Image (cartoon, grey):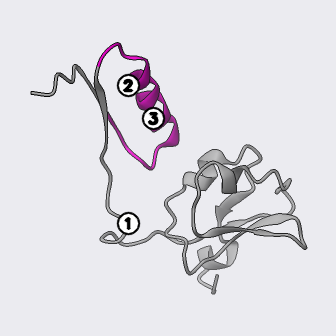
Amino acid sequence: ALGVTCIEHANPFDLAQTTEAAQRAITHEGPSALICEGLCITLSKPKPALCVDESRCTGCKRCITQIGCPAISWDAEQRRARVNPTLCNGCGLCTQVCKFGAIGPNAEAAKGGES
């Protein structure tokens, strides 16, 4: 009814897939749509919180500027990103954005300790 001739689907927690689908929709001649389908984070059980490995974090702020996650903040004194374990649902988008592999599972949480 609206004349949409290109409909792309993507998992919003797969950054590469979503970016590629968005590019296809944008470059398509004519009306297009992007439908993101994934589990609602407020209804699904969260995964363990992630954390920043300070020895690998370069302070580039890519994790902050690229995805806008409310669980990631900037520690101006340490010049490093921080993940608030209370706000982190473990979706993993930040791990896909960090080129230095500085964000990953919390070692203490993985051992059964507190995050």
Cα–Cα span, label 2 and label 3: 12 Å
1 vs 55: above or below: above
Cα–Cα span, label 2 and label 1: 25 Å
Task: Assign a secondary structure to mark 1.
Answer: loop
Q: Is residue 23 magenta?
A: yes
Task: Name the foreground residue: 62 vs 102.
Answer: 62
Residue 98: percent from left, percent from top:
70, 48
Residue 17's disc number:
3
Amino acid beneath label 2: Ala
Residue 44: percent from left, percent from top:
33, 69
Tell me the mark number nearer the camera, choosing from 2 and 3. Answer: 2
Q: Which residue is mark 1?
A: 41
Cα–Cα span, label 3 and label 1: 19 Å
Q: Quadrant of the C terminus?
A: bottom right
Q: Quadrant of the N terminus?
A: top left
Give the mark nearest the N terminus, 3 or 1. 3
Dots 2 and 3: beta carbons under 8 Å? no
Task: Name the foreground residue: 98 vs 5.
Answer: 5
Residue 52: percent from left, percent from top:
73, 65
* Residue visible at 45% across and 50% down in the picture: 13
Magenta residue span: 9-30
- Quarter of the figure with residue 9: top left
Give the mark nearest the N terminus, 2 or 1. 2
Q: Which residue is mark 2?
A: 25
Task: Name the foreground residue: 2 vs 70.
Answer: 2
Q: Residues within 10 Å of mark 3 (few under 14, many from 20)?
A: some
Residue 47: percent from left, percent from top:
47, 69
- Work out which residue is located at the far bottom of the displayed protein and give it: 114
